[in-house]
Amino acid sequence: MTPPPVLRIERLGKRYGATLALRDVTLEVAVGEIHALCGENGAGKSTLIKILAGVVRPDSGSITVGGKPLRFGVVGESERAGIAVMHQQPTVFPDLDAVDNLFVGHEKTRAGGWWLDRSAMRREAEATLAALGESFPVDIPVGNLPLAQRQMTALARALLQNCRLLILDEPTASLSARETAALHAAIDKLRQRDVAVLYVSHRLDELFSIATSVTVLRDGAHVLTSPLGAIDRAGLIQAMVGRGAAEQIVDRARQGDVAPSHPTPGRPMLCVERLGRAPTFYDVTFSASQGEIVGMAGLIGAGRSEIARAIFGIDRYDSGSVVVDGRRLGGGSVREAVQAGMALVPEDRHCEGLLASLAIDENISLAQLPRLSRWGFVRRREERAVVGEQIGQLSIKLGAPSDPVHTLSGGNQQKVVLGRWLSTTPRILLLDEPTRGVDVGAKAQIHHWIRRLAGQGMAILLISSDLPELLSLCDRIVVLRQGRVAGEFRRDEATAAQVMARALPDNPLPGIDQGILP
């Protein structure tokens, strides 16, 4: 007798004001199945996950887990039903160490519950992380760890819950190839133990390699459920976007046949000379000219984001110089960098790019407040004009500009951060992982804007873990290895193999791919 599906969703609906986030969505996930969930940002995937986690209450429909109805809007009920969620952004307690993060709410005790059994928790935490290929110290605050290790901590906590249904929301967006392989191995072990997995990712090649079936949502509605063996990549993209243009743009980018945005760059706008900040990066030298897109490649931990932060004045550097259009910056001053015409779209949009408590329009106008304010009051008419221009130009999908920014999908949140800085008309734009965690359509739109901005004469530094993205967009690629510049390639000479060879450590571990994502 066939067991009932671990998860059955029937005619689920959810509305946020005028926005219909989900409408009559039906979905089943079988025992031991790895089921992919696809769709553009704004398709309803995040809303569906929040409902399953007990964070959001739907307006209609039903959910059963293992044949039993799930009580809506109660996180504890979802946990007791065996649902564990690893969100796209690591949901960790930054001031607690990894041990406390893994066992929060499920602590092990001894002496009849009078004392915490920290030794047992530490051993189990280290063993769980080791199974994921991690060996970082478990007794330091998780907030001090890199983003990838925070993500692995969140995954380890989900694995410790002995779940029946594991929901993974963009689990590899912040992981290296080695960590991704360890994650996939852990998922396969869970599948063999009859754990069902709902796997959300924009990395389509990854889905075809790990999942067995796929469900596609578009504009909040169910569009397709199919075995992955019965559909190809082109058909899956067509189901997601409902059009062919985005597919053509992304396929061209993957093949590296998109022409450079500005074949004859103008005068140098950003000159970085022998920049160093021990122990993260040393003796870094490169430049970016008007109309030029300069890529920065390297493994996670090579120092790419730290260099961008130093250039923008967030962190001070120990040695070297940053020169903008002939003017040497003092360093350590974001105000000075902005006044010089620089802008930064950071890697972690949730922690560093957005103010979640503010509305969409307030987030967009934030960088323009000095110009839009008079005697401490914001001139709302001018603010609406600035916000409306960016919403229109970047095609931001939203209900109303006054809606909270957290109601937007990941791709549209990224556009808000980009729009904030584009409203300042910068001359130099630093983009750190600008398409991480966004869908195929939003990625194509962001690529279009990067090319367009360079074509208008802006100098762009593009930091990305997506090697096809760098190869298709950049006029030059600077490769970092262990905090130092390991090479530089012009677009017409760069290949994936050459960039990878320069990025890898001198003595990589045999048989392990430590390469650039994906």
Image (spheres, rainbow, N blue to C red):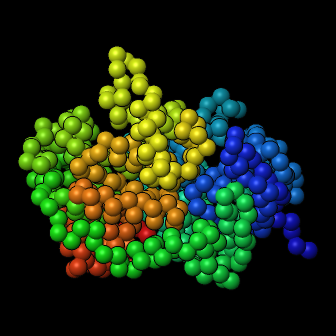
Determine the residue positioned at 64% across, 72% down: 239
Q: Residue furthest right?
A: 1
Q: Is residue 97 above or below residue 497?
A: above
x then y, percent, for residue 2? 88, 73
Q: Quadrant of residue 511?
A: bottom left
Residue 280 versus residue 304: which sits nearer the camera?
304
Q: Residue furthest top?
A: 375
x then y, percent, for residue 334? 25, 36
Determine the residue positioned at 57% across, 78% down: 233
Q: Does any portion of residue 213 appear in the rendered image?
A: yes
Q: Does any portion of residue 83 appear in the rendered image?
A: no
x then y, percent, for residue 1? 91, 74
Determine the residue positioned at 58% across, 61% down: 40
Q: Specify the quadrant that holds the C terminus.
A: bottom left
Determine the residue positioned at 78% across, 68% down: 30
Residue 107 versus residue 101: which sits nearer the camera?
101
What is the tally of numbered marks visible in this picture?
0
Q: On the picture, is 154 further left or further right than 318?
A: right
x then y, percent, for residue 96? 49, 36
Q: On the picture, is 246 further left or further right than 456?
A: right
Q: On the picture, is 145 further left or further right than 52?
A: left
